[in-house]
Image (cartoon, rainbow, N blue to C red):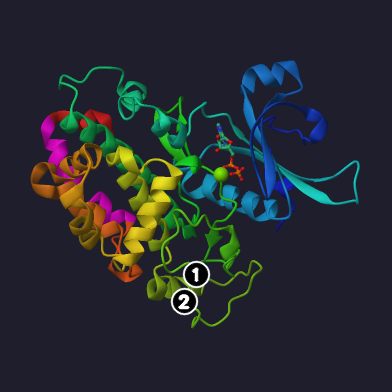
Amino acid sequence: IRNPKSSVATVCADMVLGQDDFVLGKKLGEGAFGVVYKASLANPEAAKKQGDVVLKKATEYGAVEIWMNERVRRACASSCADFLYGFRETKAKGKGAEEYWIIWRFEGEDTLYDLMQSKEFPYNVETKILGNVQDLPKGIARENKIIQTVMRQLLFALDGLHSTGIVHRDIKPQNVIFSEGSRTFKIIDLGAAADLRVGINYIPKEFLLDPRYAAPEQYIMSTQTPSAPSVPVATTLSPVLWQLNLPDRFDIYSLGLIFLQMAFPSLRTDSSLIQFNRQLKRCDYDLQAWRNLVEPRATAELRRGFDIMDLDNGIGWELLTSMVRYKARQRTSAEGALAHPYFNREGLLGLSVMQ
Ligand code: ADP
Ligand code: MG
């Protein structure tokens, strides 16, 4: 990685920032690879100008995350939370270990996970995106429109990442933030992302993957792929491999599971998702076979999910099954999904404002 200090300086145009320039607030998350805080700039004027930020103190993987964020900012900024600054810091105490500090704009309080935990979902999202202006009565048609808007935004964000050559590999509701500023959902947490075009983090670290949302192939690239460099190189051989292996379809599978959870309230808890995964595996990852298995004795809640997916001659179910498939090759791409009639059809019904 190049020296991030020299390449990033947006918070305070011509300043170089260090750890003393930030005041840490509430802890927002803690994973195996770092701790995330809400924070602000120590300088009161700068703090006022910038607003709240999010600060991640990351381990050695932070270098990759900064690299990915810089790339996203240049190529597809609207896909992800606004990246502001990143630098390497030597810990004052401890064994001289180094950590990376990564700073983003504080986009808002709610992840898609938080919003989906509410009984109000998806109406709590509708309020955020539109205000309460729907003239439809509450019910599956209106819920479908809200879910569709979220899906369109997430596919748009994923399409941006994938066209840039980045596979996220950890797409899940916890890594989707609602940006109050842009009133859209954005992707966060590029800590497990791979940039296949330049070989960054090429060698899959499958232990980073969240098994609840991971596609069955686990490995992004087939093991037959000749080994590629794990450090940045200037050449771009990878588009060929991209074509051969379709690593972007890993994210599509994960997003398909999010789609499923949005439509099926009974699949929103971790334990029910784990149970679903078990059932789907037993059905050889054939979603239609899973449906045939559970539909005859479906609870009212499960029934409701199928009813949403069956609207407009089952166009939603059709899109879902084109995302959640065993073989990566048979899954749709993000670009392909955006062109799916699930979105077109509804656009004609007067909700184009929801984009
Ligand atoms: P990790 O999962 O590695 O702990 P994340 O980057 O996913 O780190 O961040 C952890 C949590 O912090 C997120 O789930 C979210 O709640 C919050 N968060 C992260 N980035 C932002 C942001 N830009 N704006 C608001 N909240 C954020
Ligand atoms: Mg995360």
Q: List x then y, in percent, for residue 263.
A: 27, 40
- State whether the magenta stretch is mostly helix, strand or loop: helix
Identify the image quadrant of the N terminus: bottom right
The image quadrant that residue 54 belongs to is top right
- Which residue type carries mark 2? Ser
Badge 1 crowding class, 10 Å Cα cut-off, few under 14, some 14 to 19, many 20 or more, is: some
In the visual, does 5 lie left or right of 79? right
Q: Is residue 100 something that shows in the picture?
A: yes
> Which is more toward the observer, 159 or 254?
254
Asked if ligand 2 lies within 8 A of label 1, the reply is no
Residue at 32% across, 40% down: 266
- Residue 32's label in the rendered image is none
User: What residue sits right under mark 1 in the picture?
Assistant: 219
Q: Is residue 187 something that shows in the picture?
A: no
> Which is more toward the observer, 331 or 292?
292
- Residue 222's label in the rendered image is 2
Asked if ligand 2 lies within 8 A of label 2, the reply is no
Q: Which residues are magenta?
A: 334-349
Q: List x then y, in percent, for residue 114.
A: 46, 32
> Label 1 to label 2, Cα distance in Å?
7 Å
